[in-house]
Image: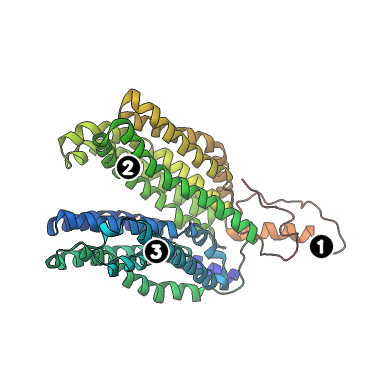
Amino acid sequence: MTTTDNRGRSLLRREQGGLGVDIVAIMTSSLATGALGFVFWTIAARGYTTAEVGRASAIISSATLLATLSNLSINSLYERFLPVAGARAHRLLVLGRSVIIATAAVLGVGFVLLGPRDTLFTSSTQAWLYPAFVVVLGIFAIQDSMLIGLGRSRTVATKNITQSTIKLILVAALIPLGTGSAVVWAWVLPAAAISLWIGMTAIRDGARAMTGPSILPRRTEIVHFYAGSFAMTAVGVVVPLVVPLVIVARLGTEMNAYFTICWLVISTAAILLNATAAPFVATASEPGTDLRHATLRFIALCGGASIVGCIALVVTAPWILSIMGPQYAAEGTDLIRLMALTLPTVAFVTIYTALARVERRLRLAVITQVVFGVVVVTGIAFSTDRWGIIGVAYVYLAADVIIAAIVAIPGIRMIRRALRTTTADDAMSGQQDGVAAAVAPGRHRATPARPAQVLRPYPAAESPTPEHDPVHPEKTE
């Protein structure tokens, strides 16, 4: 992309409401999708038999999990590098989509061959349609990051809310069939149709609008970034799967039921906080963006949401759990209240991780994520014997405080660098001046008189020579 192209995109974003609207759109999408999903299963529970709902939920949840795994953390690449891909954006989209389709198909076939096929599927046709379901849900999921990377975050809300609304209509309309297959089709068909629509319109148009040369970093740097993102994603998937197993082993299934409901509430709040990061990373990766303004807006929205969410959950915890029954309120109120106290630390870590993605310094972020997982799993294994289910909250709170303390100083430094940078163009000009001085013909490399101490979301263009960026070599932290 040329500087003019990028300035045009940034200007268009500001004219349409800016980063704040993008973040609110993504948060609204996450919240609405969760709420409409709850309504979907309520309708299914009332209109279909318990056995058919159980079969459908197993098919959908397993397909969704495999679809998530098939994304292989490619979403982080799209959010970070699509804004600077220029004319190569279309190629990157096609390549990523092809990898996801192939991976989803393999995982789907593997599940059919190795999973509980006779229990879940009533015919061989249903069984061999399952890999197609995984592919559809995998493409539907990755399109969120595609749209964010292309600067069309608001379309994400339209896409997800439309799909969630249509599936409500379908699951109600198909009640006369009374089968679990009807519930599955009500979930998958809207996703397939909307994925096709979004792919043929918003994503194709967005890719065509990306013109000019790319300013992608070296392939090795992209691979390092991807490896860090993949590691963080893996830990984020494994820990929520292991914790319930530990609780069941230590406290039994009844206590795990109380934890599951509380975790659903807290994780929903945490997802909303994490949803603020993707639009910021994409926006901050665009040359011409006012980085200082974007960072301030991101911090205000993410931090503000964490404080509001913390207070709201502390106050409303008994009422929320009373919907499930008085026993849930009695056992889970303190659990939710204590875990709600983690939200401000979650917000700070989210802000740090987002800035680390922009600067491509993920080493510490990966380390802290691994430390968090180890502390949570081992801590719960020991704390539940002494304090019972409330020990889970103690461990989560302690783990979040530990991680926030570890990243506090690096995080504050990153925020300061972002706030010292007026625009991305300033960052680029500082780098280019330094490179010109360092590689001037007939001269040895020299340290520039004014080294640019700024946030560097836009590395120099890919170079065929070893001197990719002699003034500011890429850091690995």
The amino acid sitting under disc 3 is Val
**Residue at position x 30%, y 38% in the image:** 311
Marks 3, 1: nearer the viewer:
3
Check whether the beta carbons of the residues at disc 2 and disc 3 lie within 8 A of each other. Answer: no
Check whether the beta carbons of the residues at disc 1 and disc 2 lie within 8 A of each other. Answer: no
Residue 202 seen by the camera: yes
Q: Quadrant of residue 48?
A: bottom left
The amino acid sitting under disc 1 is Ala
The amino acid sitting under disc 2 is Ile
Coordinates of residue 404 in the picture (x, y in percent): 48, 36
Q: Which residue ends up furthest to the top in the rendered image?
A: 386
Marks 1, 2: nearer the viewer:
2
Q: Considering the numbered disc 3 on the image, is that residue within a helix, a strand or a loop?
A: helix
In the depicted view, which residue is nearer to us: 465 or 155? 465
Q: What is the C-alpha distance between the residues marked 3 and 1?
A: 57 Å
In the depicted view, which residue is nearer to us: 3 or 220? 220
Q: Quadrant of the N terminus?
A: bottom right
Of the residues under marks 1 and 2, which one precedes in the sequence?
2
Q: Which residue is mark 1?
A: 440
**Residue at position x 41%, y 42% in the image:** 239
Coordinates of residue 412 in the picture (x, y in percent): 54, 40
Judge from the rendering whether residue 367 lies leftward or rightward of residue 328; answer left or right.
right
10 Å crowding of disc 3: few (<14), some (14-19), many (20+):
some
Judge from the rendering whether residue 387 lies leftward or rightward of residue 428; answer left or right.
left
Judge from the rendering whether residue 147 lies leftward or rightward of residue 249; answer left or right.
right
Picture disc at residue 109? 3
Coordinates of residue 137 in the picture (x, y in percent): 36, 64
Q: Considering the numbered disc 2 on the image, is that residue within a helix, a strand or a loop?
A: helix
Q: Considering the numbered disc 1 on the image, is that residue within a helix, a strand or a loop?
A: loop
**Residue at position x 61%, y 64% in the image:** 216
Q: What is the C-alpha distance between the residues marked 1 and 2?
A: 56 Å
